[in-house]
Image (spheres, coloured by chain):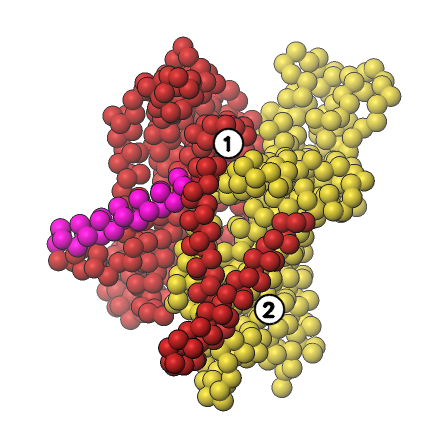
Amino acid sequence: MSMILWILLMVLALGLAGWAFRLAGQNITGNSPYFRDMPYGVAFGYALAAGALLGGLWLWFQPGAVFFRWAFQGVVIFAIVAWLFRLLGRAVGTAGTRKLFREMPLTASFGILIILIYAVLAIFAGAIAPHGQEEVFARVNILPGGNPETGGDPAFPLGTDQIGRDLLSRLIYGAQNTVGIAFVTTCLAFLLGGSLGFLAATLQGWLDQVLSRAVDVLMAIPSLIFALLLMTIASAWAGSEKWLLTVYMILIIAVIDSTRVFRLARAVGLNIVVMDYIEAAKLRGEGLPYLIFKEILPNAYAPLLAEFGLRFCFVFLTIASLSFLGVGIQPPLADWGTMVRDLSQFINFAAFSPLTAALPLLAAGAIALLTVAVNFVVDWMLHRTSGLKD
Amino acid sequence: MSSVFRIILQRIALGVLTLFIVSIVIFTAVNMLPGDFAQAILGQAATPEAIAAIRQDLGLDQPPVSRYFTWLAGAVQGDLGSSFAQANFASFVGAESGGTEVTVATQIAPRFANTMFLAGVTACIAVPFSIFLGVLAALYRNSAFDKAANVFTLSSISSPEFFLAYVLILFLAVLNPVLPSLSNIYDGMGFGERLQKTLLPALTLTLVVTAHMMRMTRAAIINLLASPYIEMARLKGISPLRVIVKHALPNALAPIINVVALNLAYLITGVVVVEVVFVYPGIGQLFVDGVKNRDIPLVQACCLIFAAAYILLNLTADIMSLLSNPRLRHPK
């Protein structure tokens, strides 16, 4: 209760500070138009920003605020690196890419950089990771930090888990498994949903009706719930073959997500098939594959690409959630969702060993970072293609 | 009035039809299970007589169509069958035992109430908060506040629920013990204590849904700001806040109500992961346990409830946006 009181007091103090700031500005500058016409909301905004700055500064020097310092350092480092990356993009490359980087906001260049890093990690995981993902070492539960005096080991910078596997290697291999599986699933969903959607848009008639109604019904079930239901059945089908369950999961999520892709592809396709050049192609006597791949697909590229990014995020999050719930990617494959679940208890040690407590957040943060990055890039792409300047 | 009434009736009929077809889909999916429930329960060593007995008891010897209608008729009356994991199979194999059978309905009912409580608390926090933020972002569009809110909401919308949940646990439960990190809710708990234990999961869900609602509120209001009547209001010399709250917001209500209902529907999916993180005794956790134990009647029932709630909320979104359109309410 006292906490709510404190918050209320703080807001009140900020409100007063904003009012005083405006009054002081008016008096000092001799009632200049900027301060005279300043709405109270703006003045409050300045006070809020100043308060946040002071609060952050105070928090920075608190001995217990390790996580705040880490988070802040992380944000600053990422911002600087993204800024340098954009600078590099502006200097190197063809005229087209240079122009692209010149117009890019910092969030988008941050997104592109993160996606590139993840791609490199995923492709070269075997070369980058110090140990194998299934390699079991003799010492279990080595603490992270690499300092022998605090229970660490320089050979295992992030420590080992409860059965003695190197966590850093598993984190790196997680990029390969989690991101790779999500990517394959998204591609499958697009192959299925995209081709059926274009087919429905081109042929129309009963095929369109049947497919659209089927998609309506499948979309009436929340996707995570439906995925969990189907995974129950898949786990019975797979029996003790764990890798088979992963394959089933890819297929299940691809089918569920292809319904969303179908909706978009059909809507985009319907707008395209009424164009004159489609009519012309039909009169030329072109076949269905030509119509879909040479006429419709190139014109539907922009919305589909944006949808691919968003769909990848959804698929990635669904797979991570399933793994977190224990029915997704199966061990011994290293995967971030499972890692979060296995390491989650360590969060209770935050007061004594912040590094240990950061382990589950590291795996969960790896998931969040990639989806945030993809979303930043898609946001920018949509903004660019829609021509919105506001 | 009659025309809008007819449209609403049509939508409701469509919703019921969808629910009916969804129930068929769920039932068919479950019946694609290989082999036999009875075999799965009793294991390889079971005698044929025992399997036959359990098959008869569960009604598995009936053809699928009649089984479906038995299940549906039961579900409509609130009888969702008995849970496999909890059922007392001693009675099936011969020996009579005095244990009472645990039905799916008795398992679900208290947890359903808990989940509704969680969703309710979340909605009470998230809806006013996000509309307030959305109006502010529209008012100070393209300012530092708007850009910061944009980055923040985009980040929280795209983070997995468990990441947000663990970050909140870290800061609000472990480092500064203000709220409990485990929501052990039981019957007969006082409202205040219950609220305190629900607050952390509710805050997590708030973070998940606020972003979307706020962005839509902002977009809906900004869309309207180019209209001539807003221009007129501005020329009259009304303050920007008044322009937005009095003139733009009422007309932006239809898309906002729509997105609120859709996000409440989204809560249903989000609730599963969040309940598992906080060990909140809700229907989502029951569902995940059912999935792990392959407790088919339980999974079937939970799935049906989730789908029904989802369809109902989508239907509400549909009807509300119809009703908030004056052109439809007052036809010429």
Q: Nearer the viewer, residue B97 or B133?
A: B133
Q: Secondary structure at mark 2?
A: helix
Residue indicated by mark 1: A350
Q: Amino acid at mark 2?
A: Ser
Q: Picture coordinates of residue B277 (x, y %)? A: 58, 36
* Viewer can see residue A147: yes
Residue that mark 2 sits on? B321
Residue A256: percent from the left, percent from the top?
48, 45
Residue in the picture at 17% in, 55% down: A90
Q: Secondary structure at mark 1?
A: loop
Q: How far across and down, in percent of the image, does residue B17 sit?
A: 65, 55
2 and 1 marks in contact (CB < 8 Å): no
Characterize the magenta stretch by its predominant secondary structure.
helix
Residue positioned 44% across, 73% down in the render: A24
Identified at 22% across, 48% down, the residue is A85
> Which chain letter goes with mark 1?
A
- Quarter in which the N terminus of chain B is drawn: bottom right
Q: Residue at x 42, y 54 (%)?
A: A53
Q: Which chain is red?
A: A
Spot occupied by residue B37 in the image (x, y as percentages of width and height) = 66, 26
Relative to residue B246, is residue A85 depicted above or below? above
Q: Which residues are magenta?
A: A69-94
Question: Mark 2 — on which chain does it sit?
Answer: B
Residues at marks 2 and 1, CA–CA distance in whole angstroms = 47 Å
Q: Residues within 10 Å of mark 2 (few under 14, many from 20)?
A: some
Answer yes or no: are tags 2 and 1 on the same subunit. Answer: no
